[in-house]
Structures are given as C-alpha cells and as structure tokens.
Image: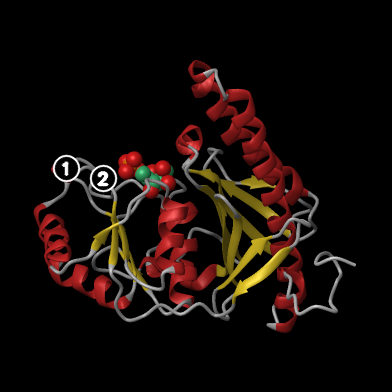
Amino acid sequence: MGEGIGDYTKNIVDLRRHMWGAGVEVELRRLIWQIAVVGKYISAKIHEANRKQAGFKNIYGEEQLSLDRGADDILKNQLQFSGFVRQYASEEQDDIIKIGSGSEKYIVTADPLDGSSLVDTNLAIGTIIGIHKESVFDTGKKTMAAALYITYGPLITMVYSAGCGAHEFVLNREGEYVLAQENIRLKEKGSIFSPGGLRRDWVPQHLKFIENLEKEGYKLRYSGGFVPDINQVLIKKGGLFTYPALQKSPNGKLRLLFELQPMAFIMEQAGGRATDGRKDIMTIKVEKLDQCSPIYIGSSTEVQMAEQFLS
Ligand code: F6P
C-alpha cells in the first residue's frame, strides 16, 4: 500500500486522526472534515475555470463571477445535508440562509472564494470559514467554536483551529489532508509586513506606522489575496497584515464576520493578535452581515506598535 488513504503503518497523521487526537468534539470534527472535503471540489472548479479561461482573457469577468457563485453553491449544498449546520451566512448571499432541520448545532459563515479576482494571475486564493455555536450577531469571542481557511496555491493547504491551537495540513496526491505543522506558534516579533489599500488613501497615523515599519527594516510582502497574505504571516511565524481605515472608508474594506473574525480566531490560537487599532477584533459585536473593520493582525510586537501609533 502506498503513502495514502488509510495507510497508518507509516507515520501519517491525517485531519480526522488529528482532530480525534486533539479531542475536538465529534460533531465539530465531522463538520470540519466535510468542509475540508468541499475545498477539494472548489479547487477542481478553479482548475476548470482556469483551463476554460486560458487564451480567452476577455471572458474572464463572467468566469470570475460564476466561480464565486459556484464555490458558494458547492458549500451551501454540502452543508445543507451535513447534519450539523442550521444556518449558513456567506459573502455571496444577502441574508443568512436556514438550512438543515433547524435543530443542528452550528452556524457556518463563509467567504467561499476570497481573492477570486487573482485567479487569472495564477496567484493563490482561498476559502475562509467560521463555525459558530450562537447567533453571529454577537462577538466572535462568545460564539465562535472553530475557524479554518484553505489556500489554493501550488499546493492546497488547510489551517484549522477548534480552540486548541492552530494546525496546518497539506492535501496530498491521494486526496488526503496530511498534518504539516501542529500547534503553529508565532514569534513575538516578525520581519515582514503586508499592507492593503492605496498609500495615498491611508490616514496619517497609519502612514506613520507603516513608515516606522519600513524604517525598522520590515520587508514588504503583499500579494493582494487576504488568505495567502495571512497564511504567509502564520507560516513564517511572524509579521503583520493590515487593511486599514481609509480616508473615505473609515471601516476599511475587509468584512468582520466572513474574513476578519475567523482569521483573528486562528491567529490568536497561534499566539498572535488581531485588533482594529484599538479593540480586539474578536470582541467587536457584529451588527450587520457586511460590516467592515480595519485590521492589524499578526505577531504581538507589530500589533502593539500599530496600537501605539493609532491611539
Ligand atoms: O476581500 C477581497 C480582497 O481581494 C482580499 O483578499 C484582499 O486582501 C483585498 O481584497 C485586497 O484589496 P485591495 O486590492 O484593495 O488591496
């Protein structure tokens, strides 16, 4: 038997085995597993769209839209029959959708395909998921049971946290998520920064903060995809991602519920921090589905430095 499904004679820890060993509650680990499987279907869809698009750049806008919707449909349809999800909230939907019988344990939030405008550039993109026990219209601290993201890059990787550390898995050729790093821990201080938004639109305090990072020799590492940019900070074990308040949009661009809180949950589990410059991202109450917030997320030294410049 080769290195692959069911071959536990070798020292392979797959996602199910890891969650079982980590003591993740049975329904939660089945749900996380199902969502990870959906990631494979979404990646097949991206691949198909890329093949179709090759040589026909002008149809790309349409392809991108259908890709976003397709990823959302795949997730929604799978979760509907998961047996664990009573509500589904997605960046692609205007309202929260009731699915399942209504008595299921969890509510899932999804950014099914974040950064899809990058598909034609062949840069990495991703899926971001939050799993909540209670209404999403509260603070992430109170309601979030788990979060995960999938990065579709040269490799497909998945990072999850169910409240006991953050762990990375790589999808192998046999279609199995294999443990790559357990209990990822950020250093106190990193050496890279990833700043979103146009420099000319930044508010003066933010500009000063970034100039300070540059002066201290931090390296600029920005792809324009939230998932790979966050993944970079996590996997390099330090640094900072920010999408700040802009002159004309004081709440920035990124969405609290679908993007920021799931990533903040994971980052905190890895020993990092996430704030809007003043408040912990996980303590901000979600008032509406498309609520945005500025974000400073990464290792504690850089987040604290941001707070000092912004306060
Ligand atoms: O929310 C979508 C998104 O593409 C993120 O993945 C990314 O961080 C951000 O927007 C990039 O925005 P901008 O192109 O304005 O820097």
In terms of image quadrants, where is residue 52?
Answer: top right
The percent coordinates of residue 296 (x first, y second) are 30, 63
Gap between marks 2 and 1 measured at Cα: 7 Å
Q: Is 224 above or below relative to 117?
A: below
Q: In this view, does 85 lie to the left or right of 263?
A: right
> Secondary structure beneath disc 2?
loop
The residue at 51%/36% (across/down) is 119
Q: Quadrant of ligand 1?
A: top left
The N terminus appears in which quarter of the rendering? bottom right
User: Mark 2: is the Cβ under 8 angstroms from ligand 1?
Assistant: yes
Query: Pointer 1: what residue?
Result: 201
- Please rate how many residues cluster around mark 1, counting C-alpha atoms within 10 Å: few if below 14, some from 14 to 19, many from 20: some
The C terminus appears in which quarter of the rendering? bottom left
The residue at 72%/44% (across/down) is 41
Q: Is residue 21 left or right of residue 191?
A: right
Q: Which amino acid does label 2 sit on?
A: Gly
Q: Nearer the viewer, residue 22 or 290?
A: 22
Q: Which of 144 and 229 is in front in this view?
A: 229
Q: What residue type is labelled 1?
A: Asp
Query: Pointer 2: what residue?
Result: 197
The percent coordinates of residue 303 (x first, y second) are 27, 71
The percent coordinates of residue 256 (x first, y second) are 41, 55
Q: Which of 191 and 161 is in front in this view?
A: 191
The residue at 9%/54% (across/down) is 204
Q: Are marks 2 and 1 in contact (CB under 8 Å)?
A: yes
Colour style of the rendered protein structure: secondary structure
Q: Which of 78 and 20 is in front in this view?
A: 20
Q: Is residue 123 left or right of residue 102?
A: left
The residue at 43%/49% (across/down) is 288
> Secondary structure beneath disc 1?
helix
- Please rate how many residues cluster around mark 2, counting C-alpha atoms within 10 Å: few if below 14, some from 14 to 19, many from 20: some
Is there any visible trace of residue 286 in the rendered image? no
